[in-house]
Image: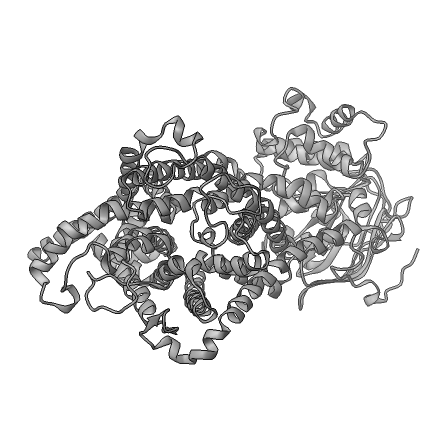
Amino acid sequence: MSPEMARGSSTKTAYGPETTMNPTTTQGAQATGAASPKIRAANVNFYYGSFQALHEVSMEFQENKVTALIGPSGCGKSTFLRNLNRINETLRDTRLEGEITLDGQNIMDFDITEVRRRVGMVFQRPNPFPKSIFDNIIYGPKINGMLKGTSAAEMVEKSLRRAALWDEAKDKLHESAYALSGGQQQRLCIARALAVNPEVLLLDEPCSALDPIATAKIEDLLVTLKGQCTIVIVTHNMQQAARVADTTGFFLMGRLIEHDKTNVIFKNPARRETEDYITGRFG
Amino acid sequence: MTGRNTYRNAVNNVMLSLSGVCAVLTVSTLFVILSYLVYNGFSSLNLDFFTQLPKPTGQVGGGMANAILGSAQVVLIASIIGLPIGFFAGIYLAEFGGKTFSMLVRYTADLLNGVPSIVIGIFAWGVLVVPMHHFSALAGGMALSLMLIPITARSTEQFLIEIPRSMREGALALGATKWRTIATVIVPAARRGIMTGMILGIARISGETAPLLFTALNNEFWSSGLSSPAATLPVMIFTHAVAPYDDWHRQAWAAGLVLLTMVLVANILARTVISRGASLPK
Amino acid sequence: MATSTAAVRHATSPTRRQPFGDEVAYAVTWFFATLILVLTVWIVYELWVQSSPSIAKFGFRFLTTKMWNPVTDEYGALPFIYGTVITSVVALLISVPIGVGAAIYLSELAPTKVSNALTFLVELLAAVPSVIFGLMAIFTLVPFMRDYIGPVIQAVLGKVPLFSGRVYGVGYLTAALILTIMIFPYIISVSREALMAVPRDQREAALALGATKWESTYQVVVPYARLGIFGAIFLALARAIGETMAVTMVIGNDPSIHASLFAPGYTIAAVLANEFTEATGKVYLSALIELGLVLFGLTMILNAAAQLLIILTTGKGSARG
């Protein structure tokens, strides 16, 4: 199959509404929709000590869309994701070059805790706090001072409903979060992240520790959630990307090789490397 | 070949059994001590023992009430001083420390921990008793706190480090600042282990005698306040055991039983009941 | 919207704009951590300063003189160093084989539950206060030594200088025996961890070649763990030389050197416990404090060596009691 350039064609896909596409470039696609991007990364280089983990990554994330980041192990997709909410700054000896903006504003110019409130994160393994389900969810709003004037119980119920966990958790709100199953704990972590009303939700391989049924529940959840926030999900499972993402970015060895609508990436990738990865020539 | 194998198998069996014998032997010493104390001391544990002052030398009877109170005083002072210092130092080591400075602090804490308790006693004597011109419960408490600090610091650090990074990141990702993360998530998550460490430390210092010999000294009567000498249980055991009076020996056994029971109960409670939830589920 | 590609414009550094609460928390905890350093340095300083009259008067002779005479104000540390070393070494000689043997049992042979339960009990032994060991020793070990152990050994080895002379019951050997029991937990629990840290495939390699379990343990596992076991020994030795109360109660309080293990003697810690509060005179007191300094120095060296060895094998240092 020879790669074809999708020039200005409008394609209706099962994965999202129509968008017009610019030609793909080697450094990343500009999937310009009607509005300017929610998050924009420009020429991002990132170093762990002297090791350069990201090379000139430029990428845009449109509002209310799901973007998947795929690539083999160690390609930098998680590293890139973790820069979007500045959580990499908790590691020693790291350096970020380039610009990442949220609604046009450089995230380095914000107060760091505000960035993290607006850009939430769900981690690879469920990491609920050793507190009750209720206290887990209310933690974010409490420290961000969001509880004034709103009932905590309402907030908890709303978050749990958004995470499709309310029915299963409503009778155990004050039990330990560890009483939940793995899949439920991960949805709890999603609810906890949603409780602070983030505009963006970053998910770092959220289903890798879960069974297929739990995975399916979370994937359904993500499709519902994108109407409420912008979603970026790192996954090493290509089928997952194909199932949930509007656009997909393929990373290899710290570079963004290609970023395009998901069905283009999977059916008609512009780059040979992308095609090799998709077809399983390397893992 | 078979002969050699039989020999090797015989050696195998003998040596392995011997090692089992060694294990049983060492564990049994604990039970031997316990049974001797019960046998010799239990009968002397009457109400008098817990409520009366010691009788003048040579007279039969009396109790060690002042020593029990004195021990409590001294341990309390030590805890009030030593636990916070150790706790916060432990937080520094686990959460804030730079690499070389932390290593230095850790090494020094281990060094301090290894200082023989009698040397700690000399230091406390030189720094507190001499300027104050008298022995005091306060000096005894401060001497013991010097022993409590490194134990508490290292064990606090150890339990904080065990909390996985993902939990810290989970809180930070919600917009928490570092100190808030530590105070509202990490320390509560590690609280069981930290408490265990503290209880074990307190149990350890409550049995210490040497640092008290030149600080709190001893007192035949109730101590008249923190800045006067105080009788303590371990020191009483020492003085009564080496004295030539049978009645004092009887009291020493009783006091020993009380002290050992307290220490062992604290250890067992801390190690089993409290630690049970100390590590997080996987 | 700024689209500048000036690469280095926003390099991060971890200390950039810390929230105020974090700064405070850092400062407070740093203060207490530094306090540990300050206190330790202060202890060394105090010991040094307080022992200076004695150091000035005796110099290095202090470590080699046998005389300890408060009347003539002549002080030498040798009897106490001798007593400390002899009691500790004998204690090690007895407790290391038994302790390592027990550690082997606990790490290699016992089922996990049994091993954990027994290790728990051994660690409880470490929690027993020194004065309780002393109490036991005075009333049980001393008569036992005088009436049974002494006569039995002398019946066989009485001619040897090491075992000659009258058996008082108190003395070097009695102190060594009680020390043996007190250092068991250190030998056992550290050795056990060192043995458990030996990778499984080492054992399996030996067994796969036809070794018996004992052979694989003795010839492969123990040598592999030897650094950790040495660490345990140093740790136990450091503990033994600083041990005060139990030894004081059974050493016999004789500030001279005797060849026989049954003779009474003295250790640094014991003389400090007994004579410190009675000491009159500047030189007397500072001589005692200098002894304390010597003891401190010895334990510091031993503990440092122990920690190093333990970290090398099990990967974790510890401030065990």
On screen, residue B66 versus residue C237, left or right, reads right
Residue C217, can we see it? no
Q: Position of residue B252 (x, y in %)?
A: 34, 40
Q: Position of residue A77 (x, y in %)?
A: 69, 53
Displayed quadrant of residue C265: bottom left
Observer-nearest residue: C212 or B265? B265
- Which residue is at 42% across, 40% downward? B263
Give the vertical position of A148 relative to C53 (above or below): above
Q: Position of residue A123 (x, y in %)?
A: 66, 43
Quadrant of the frame with the N terminus of chain C: bottom right
Q: Farthest residue toward the top?
A: A171
Q: Farthest residue toward the right?
A: C1
Q: Position of residue C65 (x, y in %)?
A: 33, 76
On screen, residue B167 versus residue C214, left or right, reads right
Observer-nearest residue: C102 or B164? C102
Displayed quadrant of residue A220: top right
- Which residue is at 88% across, 48% downward? A103
- Which residue is at 83% across, 37% downward? A17
On screen, residue B215 versus residue B57, left or right, reads right
Displayed quadrant of residue C83: bottom left
Observer-nearest residue: B126 or A128? B126
